[in-house]
Amino acid sequence: MKLLLSSLLCIALCIKAFSQTPVSLKEYENIFLKSNLILIAEQFNIDASKAAIIQAHLWENPYFSADVNAVNPQDGKVFDVGRNGQKAFAVQQLIYLGGKKKKEVELARANAALAEIAFKDVLRNLRFQLRTSFFEVYYSTISAASFEKQLNNLDTLLQAYNAQAQKGNIPLKDVVRLQALYLNLKNEQTQLLNTIAEEQNNLRVFAASQNELFPQPEAEELTAYEKQLSLSMEDLQQQAVTNRADFLMADRSIDAAKLNLEWQRSLAVPDITVGAMYDQRSGAFNNQVNLTVGIPLRLWNRNQGNIKMADIRINQASTEKQQLLYQLNGEVNAAFQKYMIAKSNYAMLNRTVSTNFDVVYNGVYQNFQRRNISLIEFTDFMESYNQSIIQFNQIKKSLILACEQINYATGTTIF
């Protein structure tokens, strides 16, 4: 009963997987670009950084103050603010010196540029993850479909062998051997179905959709990965330096750190506050109009800590860029080596492995039904055949993922 329930569950999962709407890689990426919530959130970050540029242009608002009489003890009046009373008004404006606003605006623009580069880096990472999940589902589904066909045939054989065993025409060990083959194949299929379920969930998250779409790449999308790589490893490393968003961000971070240092130094320059004041009766003269000027004295706080911190940030950003360069070259090197191995395996596959597995399988299955081959020969072939199916799809998938690893490591589309 447990075996029957497990079989029904796997069949249901297969039917669900194969009944989805087929979507090409290009179509899936278009859905991803329009709907992915992480990209939308990063776009908001760009908009926010652009708003910071607007804010950096703005000056402080003028400051208005009023001084009015509350109690006049001499005449016994309250709020004596008339012609013979007392009131004073003042307006003050902070004037930035040392080019503060200009440097603040430049820093805000640099941060906005960094936000745009950060968006591209997030896009690079998500696109690589999406394509990895896309082809994992595609090739796992192909293998699972092949296994389903074999399981159906084995189920038919098991029913016939059980009937013959009950009649005493064949030994029970033959039935057990077929059952072992069936269970092994079922376990392989279950693992594939689990992989499909996990990667399908990833694809739904990438597309921000609950609809299940079946990856079905176009023929030209698959053949694009078969072209020969014409660039050397050094060329690929240069491509990465030129195009990878995280390296560009590290480079721009140094510029932003330098701008921040200039801004912090400008903050050490004291600003001046100018204003005008009207005083009705409390000054040296009646209806007195005064000009006010104020400036902080640089006695203790000259922004020394922030200036030193900004200077350190430049060294930190330069060190991080150098470290990223080593990491970048290493990633390109590893991707290149993986590609060469995958390409070699794929070329060997095309030379030594028949692409028409179904013809071979059908021939062996029919010969076994006709008792032209023994049970041991049949089960040995089935075990080898199942592994060949998995390895065949694994090698093709490995080449595609190796190509995508080069795209990811270089930050550009080579395949």
Image (cartoon, grey):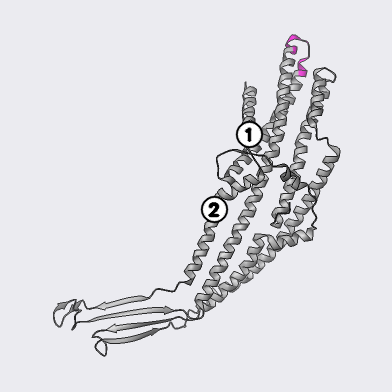
For image coordinates 34% across by 79% down, the residue present is: 91
| Image quadrant containing the N terminus | top right
In the figure, residue 42 lies in which quadrant? bottom right
Q: Residue furthest top?
A: 167
* Residue 211 x, y percent position in the rendering: 56, 39
Chain part drawn in magenta: 164-174
Q: Residue furthest bottom?
A: 284
Three-letter code for the amino acid on which mark 1 is drawn: Ala
In the figure, residue 63 lies in which quadrant? bottom left
* Residue 380 x, y percent position in the rendering: 81, 27
Residue nearest the viewer, comparing 226 with 119: 226
Q: Main secondary structure of the magenta part?
A: helix
Question: Dot 1: few (<14), some (14–19), or many (≥20) neighbours within 10 Å?
Answer: many
Whether residue 173 is in magenta: the answer is yes
Residue nearest the viewer, comparing 330 with 272: 272
For image coordinates 64% across by 31% down, the residue present is: 14
Whether residue 201 is in magenta: the answer is no
Q: Which residue is labeled 1 in the image?
A: 17
* Residue 129 x, y percent position in the rendering: 65, 48
Question: At numbered mark 1, what does the secondary structure look like: helix, strand or loop?
Answer: helix
For image coordinates 71% across by 35% down, the residue present is: 142
- The answer to whether the residue labelled 2 contacts the one labelled 1, judged by CB atoms less than 8 Å apart, is no
Note whether 365 is above or below 68 in the view shown. Answer: above
Label 2 to label 1: alpha-carbon separation: 29 Å
Note whether 85 is above or below 222 in the view shown. Answer: below
Q: Which residue is labeled 2 in the image?
A: 40
Question: Dot 2: few (<14), some (14–19), or many (≥20) neighbours within 10 Å?
Answer: some
Question: At numbered mark 2, what does the secondary structure look like: helix, strand or loop?
Answer: helix
